[in-house]
Amino acid sequence: MKVPTPHNGANLGDIARTVLMPGDPLRAKYIAQKYLTDVVCYNEVRNMLGFTGKYKGVKISVQGSGMGVPSMGVYSKELFEGYNVENIIRIGSAGSLANEVASNYSNNTKLNDILVADNVFSDSNYIKANKYNDIKPVASSSLLLKLNKVLEKTNINVKIGNIYTSDTFYMEKELLKEISKKDILGVEMETLALYTNARVSNKNAIAMFTVTDNIIMGQSVSSEERLKGLDKMIELALELAYDCEKDR
């Protein structure tokens, strides 16, 4: 893939091997300003901001993906296949499916929980449309292993399991209740594309989320709680990124 791409103005070498990827480009800017040093903005195309800096002395990048499967599909593919990115760590928000008819994991998923997707269910046509029929969208086993080692050194609790990627943000409550009967931790909108592209490109990806709402029960966290919860997840992701790069 030729770079710069139509969606990314960076040159080869501008982007680190490991990239943190929130949906919101302004959150990418927030992470870069708060947690990284020696920061350089490498992309402003379409305002999908991307930054490279150092965390504990190692080179790490952070870039927005936009919202939904199509947008994540574009940006993650270009990073993997154009910019030689090896690892993408998605950091986003998810909705809890806990309710009176929920079963299995979803019963225990609460606001502010941190979730990690090891497998993805979806209503998206992304795999079929791209004729990736043999691709199973799962998290990278090497990143899961590294994450578990990072967790052993912290007091952060996460729930690892199935996530549902939807093409629809405003899903009907009855449909959400049907999904909640399955063994699914939460619902979001991007991970299917990320995991599929990682498998196709023979690269690594993992997605983690802070639970910020429950549409079925009409619950959501305050803006202050949201920021605090997201910061905890961001710090976990940064430690994982550091572990990926520290021995290079």
Image (tube, rainbow, N blue to C red):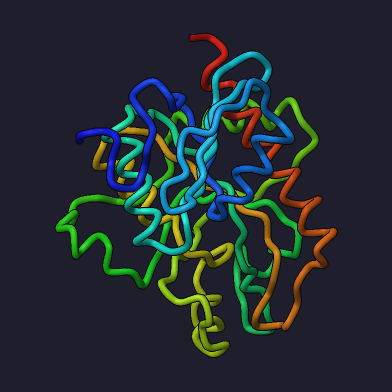
What's the residue at 39%, 49% (across, down)? 194
Rendered view: 24 above or below 99: above
What's the residue at 47%, 62% (across, down)? 67
What's the residue at 54%, 28% (across, down)? 52
Rendered view: 31 above or below 230: above
Give coordinates of residue 124: x percent, y percent: 33, 69
Give coordinates of residue 15: x percent, y percent: 44, 27
Instruction: Name the outermost residue toward the top.
Output: 247
Q: Quadrant of residue 97?
A: bottom right
Give coordinates of residue 59: x percent, y percent: 55, 19
What's the residue at 47%, 57% (across, down)? 66
Give coordinates of residue 228: x percent, y percent: 81, 50
Q: Nearer the viewer, residue 9 or 220?
A: 9
Rendered view: 109 above or below 204: below
Quadrant where the N terminus is found in the figure: top left
Q: How many marks?
A: 0
Rendered view: 10 above or below 91: above
Left/right placement of residue 7 relative to residue 61 reads: left
Q: Quadrant of residue 213?
A: bottom right
Left/right placement of residue 43 relative to residue 107 reads: left
